[in-house]
Amino acid sequence: MREGMNGPVLEVGELVKDYVTRDAKLRQRVARAVDGISFAVQPGETFAIVGESGSGKSTVGRVLLKLTDATEGNVHLLGEEILGMPERRFRALRRHIQMVFQDPLAAFDPRATIRSSLREFAGFGGGRSRAEQNRAIDQAIRDVGLPPEISWRRPSQVSGGQLQRLSIARSLLVKPQLLFLDEPTSSLDVSIRGQIVNLLVEIQDREGIAYLLVAHDLRVVYVMAHRVAVMYLGQFVEIGTRDQIYERARHPYTRGLLEAALLDEPARAGDPVRLTGEISEEQVRKPGCRLTPRCPFAEARCDEPQQLRPTGDGRLVRCWKAVEVPVSIGLHGSGSSSEGR
Ligand SMILES: Nc1ncnc2c1ncn2[C@@H]1O[C@H](COP(=O)(O)OP(=O)(O)OP(=O)(O)O)[C@@H](O)[C@H]1O
Ligand code: SF4
Ligand SMILES: [Mg+2]
């Protein structure tokens, strides 16, 4: 196995996912949920994907976990292409990518004790005696800040926050190299979200696990992410370090998202950007910038196809105006490259 390798844990190239559905008259409809995205996640890094509901974030994760087939592109997990890989071979690799569910109840059998659900993971791959499995379970539960005895309860007998800690313990039992975190705190009370975020950061610092994080809450992403990709209608529109995105965003959509989410924060560089209207799937079928109907800076040239282009400070932006004339839309300075978190 590739333990100790130096390359990225995950490398995604030009990934496309079409969902094919049928309407009431049984006519086929193809919806492109992911449209040519590329990124890599390095060991120990948190790469976050943000964007409004329906932008395609969860679909990326579903393809990586092979819960749905990709339409085009490639995905290398620990250096191995997984998309065309036979199921039997993927199963051995599968333990290296684990998921933490938005709703921790989904991770547990409601009729069984938590311990028996954890045991399935502790025994993964064989080779551990029952006593070793018990020790591994106890340690994993302590590592998420809970007493091992809690595992004799059923999922309904612990709080939501405790159950999310236990679902993290469950994922860690197989010693994965990558955790896919899809909205890991959004089903929890606001008062305990911070604790789960801090726990995930502590675990990453200790174990060096890479995270692929999807979250609506831009504060959670700010605390956890090293790099951030902003997704709009299936495409990345800006990718940069956390500080580039949060302090010096260039793309009007990024700025609009931050503006809407962080209204009580101190003013950021540049003028405020207010997006109008709602995300519209119609735009996917047009060649130009998908943000055109909502962007306060749109003009004729925006109807031409927009590529992700480097801005010279290490980030990529899909907007000719943000790359060529950033000052005219109030997006100041390229800033210096930053290391993020
Ligand atoms: N199984 C499916 N069949 C058909 N279309 C789907 C399916 N799953 C998702 N979609 C569509 O694909 C697009 C992307 O959905 P996805 O769930 O990936 O978005 P998301 O960014 O995770 O949204 P949210 O923030 O609400 O979780 C949406 O338009 C959605 O309606
Ligand atoms: S290309 Fe035009 S419409 Fe698209 S984000 Fe840039 S300025 Fe706005
Ligand atoms: Mg989702």
Image: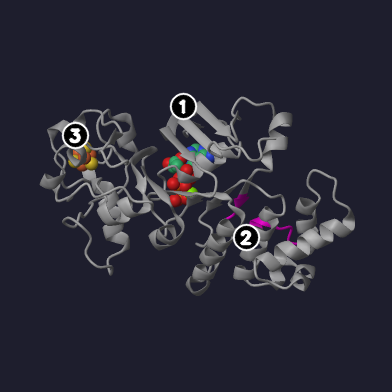
At label 3, counting other C-alpha atoms closer than 10 Å, the crowd grade (few under 14, some 14-19, many 20 or more) is some
Real-space Cα separation, disc 1 to disc 2, in angstroms = 37 Å
Label 3 lies in ligand 2 vicinity (Cβ under 8 Å): yes
Real-space Cα separation, disc 2 to disc 3, in angstroms = 43 Å
Task: Describe the element under mark 3 as helix, strand or loop.
Answer: helix
Sequence-wise, the earlier of marks 1 and 2 is 1
Sequence-wise, the earlier of marks 2 and 3 is 2
The residue wearing badge 1 is: 27
The residue wearing badge 3 is: 302
Question: Disc 2 residue type?
Answer: Pro
Q: x, y (%) of residue 218?
A: 39, 59
Q: Quadrant of ligand 2?
A: top left
At 28% from the left edge and 42% from the top edge, which residue is drawn? 313
At 28% from the left edge and 70% from the top edge, which residue is drawn? 264
Q: Number of callouts in the render? A: 3
Q: x, y (%) of residue 79?
A: 59, 31
Question: Disc 1 residue type?
Answer: Arg
Q: In which quarter of the image is the N terminus?
A: top right
At label 1, counting other C-alpha atoms closer than 10 Å, the crowd grade (few under 14, some 14-19, many 20 or more) is few
Name the quadrant containing residue 37. Answer: top left
At 72% from the left edge and 36% from the top edge, which residue is drawn? 92
The residue wearing badge 2 is: 104
At label 2, counting other C-alpha atoms closer than 10 Å, the crowd grade (few under 14, some 14-19, many 20 or more) is many
Residue 156's label in the rendered image is none
Name the quadrant containing residue 328. Answer: top left
Q: Horizontally, is 235 left or right of 98 in the view?
A: left
Q: x, y (%) of residue 29?
A: 44, 29
In this picture, which residue range is highlighted in magenta?
A: 99-112
Real-space Cα separation, disc 3 to disc 1, in angstroms = 32 Å
Asked whether 105 falls inside the magenta stretch, the response is yes
Task: Describe the element under mark 2 as helix, strand or loop.
Answer: helix
